[in-house]
Image (cartoon, rainbow, N blue to C red):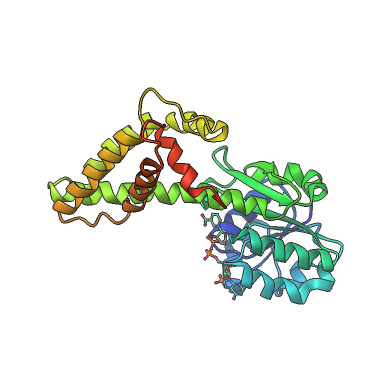
Amino acid sequence: MTNVTVLGLGNLGQALAATLLTAGHPTTVWNRSPEKAAGLAGRGAVPAASAAGAVATADLVVVALLDYPTVHDVLEPLAGALSGRTVVNLTSGTPEQARTLAAWAERNGVRYLDGAVMAVPQTVGTPEAFLFYSGSAQAYEEHRDLLALLGEPRHLGEDPGLALLQDIALLSGMYGMFAGHFQAVALGWTAGLSAVEVTAQLVRWLTALLPALPHFAAEMDSRDYTTETSNLAINATGLGNILAATERQGVPAGLLAPLQELFLRQLDAGHAAASLSRAVEELRAGA
Ligand SMILES: NC(=O)c1ccc[n+]([C@@H]2O[C@H](COP(=O)([O-])OP(=O)(O)OC[C@H]3O[C@@H](n4cnc5c(N)ncnc54)[C@H](OP(=O)(O)O)[C@@H]3O)[C@@H](O)[C@H]2O)c1
């Protein structure tokens, strides 16, 4: 059993600490607003009066705070106490923020793992949850069994920014999906359809389309965009119609308009017969 400390008992920190307690790990908890530790204390957690007190005996410090500036505010005064210990930071942020914090940790003799939680608090500790880690492979290997309690763990490499890079990649896909959902609902409303009615059909449609993504991905990696089916020309025509019809319904079309710009630039460059997936070339960094 590992002596774990959880710093930050917001929605995520509470779920992390509860999962560790259920597995029998001695768990110390700290939160800026101490009342949030009460429920966990009832389940066997040891509430600490200060963050310094919380980390004093920890083999592993799990951090789930609002953002990276908060993590710096909380951890920097603890540099001495954390020296020689391992910190796993599951706070969301940018790859650059993770690298900066990892550099601070290294300067202070702290082993650092950055992590990204692909779960909501309710699914932490269930088979649905998965987490990305990056940074110290040694720390990851040492604590892998404990980390696996939170959700399926995957270490992406020593570069501490990798977990959050993967996080923002997946969240970008998620927000794109939300944009499409919002657009569909707004259109449905103009025809008197409820959001629930439109969404039921949208879920069915998106589910049928999901298998296309790995197919597109293979085209993108190989850069072979030869297609017999859904080419850029037909999609640019289709999306053009959708944008025009959306505006005629009085619904702003701005969420999807940038996608049409990618299609049109590819058409201008002579790729009308290429697969729709070729639009990604417009986003290639440094292109
Ligand atoms: N919830 C999720 O589904 C989820 C999933 C993946 C990743 N995350 C990430 O995990 C992190 C925590 O998320 P959450 O949902 O637990 O957020 P939350 O419920 O809003 O909790 C925020 C935590 O940060 C603390 N905090 C805020 N400002 C502080 C300060 N100045 N000094 C000290 N502590 C401070 C809060 O303490 P108080 O209680 O005192 O305010 C609380 O413990 C975020 O980066 C979030 O993006 C969340």
Residue shown at 47% from the left, 32% from the top = 216
The image shows residue 34 at horizontal and vertical percentages of 61, 72
In front of the other: 167 or 130: 167
Residue shown at 62% from the left, 72% from the top = 70
Residue shown at 36% from the left, 31% from the top = 231
In front of the other: 74 or 184: 184
Question: From the viewer's perspective, is 84 left or right of 129?
Answer: right
Residue 1 visible in image: no
The image shows residue 114 at horizontal and vertical percentages of 69, 55
The image shows residue 282 at horizontal and vertical percentages of 46, 47
Q: Quadrant of residue 276?
A: top left
Residue 17 visible in image: yes
Q: Is residue 224 above or below residue 180?
A: above
* Quadrant hosting ligand 1: bottom right
In front of the other: 240 or 40: 240
Question: From the viewer's perspective, is 113 left or right of 263?
Answer: right
Q: Is residue 202 above or below residue 229?
A: below
Question: From the viewer's perspective, is 211 left or right of 126?
Answer: left
Residue shown at 78% from the left, 56% from the top = 3
Residue furthest to the top: 228
Tell how many labels. 0
The image shows residue 168 at horizontal and vertical percentages of 54, 53
